[in-house]
Amino acid sequence: MLQLRHAEKTFRKLDATHPIVAVVGPRQAGKTTFLKEQMAQPGRTTYTTLDDISAKALFDESPEKFARQHLDMQKTNIIDEAQYGKEAGIKLKHWADSGYKLWISASSQSLLESNVLSFLAGRVGLMTLYGFDLSETLEAKNLKAYTPAQMDDTVWQHATYGSYPRAVLTSDPEEKKLILKNLFTTVLLKDVFASFGIQDQNTLERLARFLATNMATELNHQTAASHLSVTAATVRKYVDALEKSYLVKRCPPFFTNKNLELVKQPKLYFIDTGMRNAILDDYPSGLQNNGRLYENYLFSEITKTGQAVQYWKSKSQAEVDFIIQRHGKPIPIEAKLYAPTTVPRSLQSFIEKYRPENAYIACYQGDEKTLQSHQTAVQILRTDSFLEQINAE
C-alpha cells in the first residue's frame, strides 16, 4: 500500500524552487521511501547511498568521478545519508551549479551545520520528516472511522511502539520490539557514536537509559553527570549528539524576557516514545498511570507539525506542559490522561499572567468540553481532536 505523507505538499513547493531538496530526520523514518515515491514517472531518478563504502570513497575522492558514476543530468538524483560525505557542502554546491537536480537525505543534523549550509545558501530547501503522526498511523491501519475505544487503542499503541513506519506497519508486538531494539543499536553506533566523536559507548548507552527513565523532566546536567560519574561537559556533549541524531529533543522554557530563557534548564523528551520504551525494554500494557509517557507522546506529535514547543514554570512552581506560538502570541497546552472537570491551577496562573486567546487541555480519555478562565476559552479535547485543531490553525 502506498503510504501518503502529509509532508508531500511542502516537499513539492521546495522542489519547484530549489535545485537541491534536503529531507532530514530520524533514521528509518521513511525518508528514502518518501523521496522515491515523489517521482511521478518510474525510471526518472538515480539512487546512491553513502552508506555504501565504494560510493562514499568516490564521493570523498573526487566530485567528477562520483558524478560520472552516480549522477545523471537528465534525471533527479537521490543521494541518501549525505551526511557521511566529506566536504559535502562544496560538492553539492558544485553539482547544483552545474545543472544537476538533487534530492538528498540525512539522518543526522551534521548536514545542517554551518560548514555545509554556508555553501548551499539559496540552493537548498530543507524539510524534516519524522515517523508517522497519529493521522498517518490511522491511514496506515485503514481506520477511516473509529469508536473512542479504537482511538484509545491506537494512541496507546502509537505511544508504546512509536511512529517508525516499519514498527507501525507490523502487527506483531514482538516484531515491533525487535525493530525498535535493532534501530536503537544502529542509531547509537552509526549516527551518534561514529558521527560525533563520542569516545565512550558504555557511557552513551547509560546516558540514554538515564534520559529514558527521566523523560519529560527538567534536564540537570550536573545531576546526570553525578549519576554517570562523568563531567557535566561530557553530558552536554553526549546529549547534543543524541539530539543531532534525532533521538531526543530539548524543550526550552518560555519567558518574555529572553535573557532569563537562556539560563533556565530545558526539559528533555524523546522524538519517538517507542524508541524510549525500547531503551528500557519497558512497553506498558496501557497508558493508565503513565502520564509522563503520554506527555512525551504529545510533545512528539506537536513537534511533527513543525511547531516550536516550550514549557512554562513560574517562580512559585506553577507549570504548564507546553507553550506554542501563534502570530507571536502564546498558546498554553496541558497534557492529561483524563479530562479534568475544572481548569488546573497552573494553567489558570499562566492565563492570568499572559491572557492568551486560546488554551488547550489534551486528554487521553474523557469528555470534550470548553471551560472559561479569565475570559480565555479552555478547550478540553481528546488526542485526535486536539491534534486536528492545532494543525488546522
Image: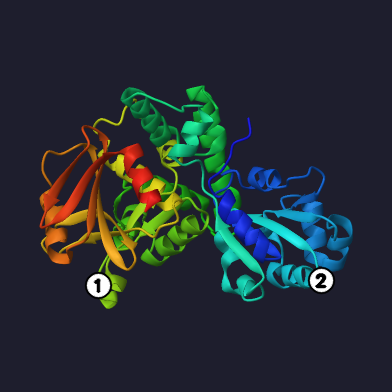
Percent of width and height locating residue 318: 14, 57
Which one is earlier in the sequence, the residue at label 2 or at label 1? 2
Q: Residue at x 67, y 70 (%)?
A: 123
Judged left or right of residue 37, residue 328 is left
Percent of width and height locating residue 254: 27, 65
- Badge number at residue 98: 2
Report if residue 139 is visible in the image.
yes
| Label 2 secondary element | loop
Percent of width and height locating residue 53: 77, 52
Judged left or right of residue 275, residue 51 is right
| Type of amino acid at the residue the image marks with label 1 | Thr
Q: Residue at x 24, y 49 (%)?
A: 360
Q: Against 382, is 86 above or below?
A: below
Q: Against 51, is 220 above or below?
A: below
Q: Residue at x 37, y 54 (%)?
A: 393
Of residues 212 and 223, the one drawn nearer to the viewer in this rendering: 212
Report if residue 196 is visible in the image.
no
| Type of amino acid at the residue the image marks with label 2 | Ser
Q: Residues within 10 Å of mark 2 (few under 14, many from 20)?
A: few
In three-dimensional space, the C-alpha distance between marks 2 and 1, rounded to whole angstroms, equals: 46 Å
Percent of width and height locating residue 267: 31, 56
Colour treatment of the image: rainbow
| Label 1 secondary element | loop
- Badge number at residue 176: none
Of residues 29 and 390, the one drawn nearer to the viewer in this rendering: 390
Instruction: Name the residue carrying label 1.
Output: 256
